[in-house]
Structures are given as C-alpha cells and as structure tokens.
Amino acid sequence: MLKFTAEHEWLKIEGDVATVGITNHAAEQLGDLVFVELPEVGATFDKGADAATVESVKAASEVYCPLDGEITEINQAIVDDPSLVNSDPQGAGWFFKLKLKVAADAAALLDEAAYNELIA
C-alpha cells in the first residue's frame, strides 16, 4: 500500500514498517541530486521532523518524517550515489525504513489519487 504526504514523501507500508522516500514529482522539482544525508539507525522522530537532507544543483531541501517512529534501516546506496534518487525515486531510491509508533496513523495520509490531485 502506497501513501503520500503533502510534503512529497511516499510510504510503502508493510505491517508496522514503512519504507520512505521522495516522490517522482519531488525528484523532478529538485533536479540532479549531488548529496544525501540520512538519519542514524535507531533514531526516533516525530511526524513532521527533519529526518534527512538532500542537495541538488538547485537547492538543499529537508525530507520530513511522515509519521512518528524509529529508523530501522537506511539506504546507503543513495548516499554513495545520489543519482539513484533521480533515476528511481519510488524504487531503488528509497531513503529509510521507519517502524511506525502507531501503524493506524498511516490511514490519515494521502492515497495516490489525492496526491496526484495535490500536484496537478
């Protein structure tokens, strides 16, 4: 199940763990990424907190934690090669996995149709 935030993050939710990244739209708006900074495994974040940073040739931007939870895994591949986020933002370019504090909170996020309406 994919969910989205108004801040252009996507979540693939499996049980109480969400894989989080930035949307195709966000990657296009940012342009070519040159740097990605990810959170530490074990770090906990509240919804809306700055969890990661991306820098492109255009600007630096924050990636927000979409829900309350704990980082269980990061994608080292995008730190080593930020262009993965540009080439496959909703696949190999994922940022981190988040163990959700309350999995039911994901129901309040946008579905794909609502997100597409937001960016239209």
Image (cartoon, helix red, strand yellow):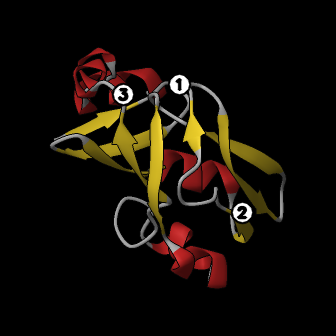
Give the percent coordinates (x, y) of residue 67: 44, 28
Disc 3 to disc 1, how far (Cα)? 18 Å
Give the percent coordinates (x, y) of residue 24: 45, 53
Element type where label 3 sits in the image: helix
> Looking at the image, is 63 positioned above or below residue 56?
above
Q: Which of marks 2 and 1 is nearer the N terminus?
A: 2
Whether residue 17 sits left or right of residue 28 in the image: it is left
Residue at position x 65%, y 30% in the image: 49
- The amino acid sitting under disc 1 is Lys
- The amino acid sitting under disc 3 is Tyr
Residue at position x 25%, y 28% in the image: 103
Q: Quadrant of the N terminus?
A: top left
> Looking at the image, is 24 positioned above or below residue 6?
below
Q: Residue 115 carries which label?
A: 3
Residue 22 appears anywhere in the view: no
Which residue is labeled 1 in the image?
Answer: 47
Disc 2 to disc 3, how far (Cα)? 25 Å
Whether residue 103 sits left or right of residue 21 in the image: it is left
Q: Which of 94 and 15 is in front in this view?
A: 15
Q: Which mark is residue 19?
A: none
Residue at position x 68%, y 61% in the image: 31
Q: Which of 106 and 87 is in front in this view?
A: 106
Residue 73 appears anywhere in the view: yes
Which residue is labeled 2 in the image?
Answer: 37
- The amino acid sitting under disc 2 is Glu
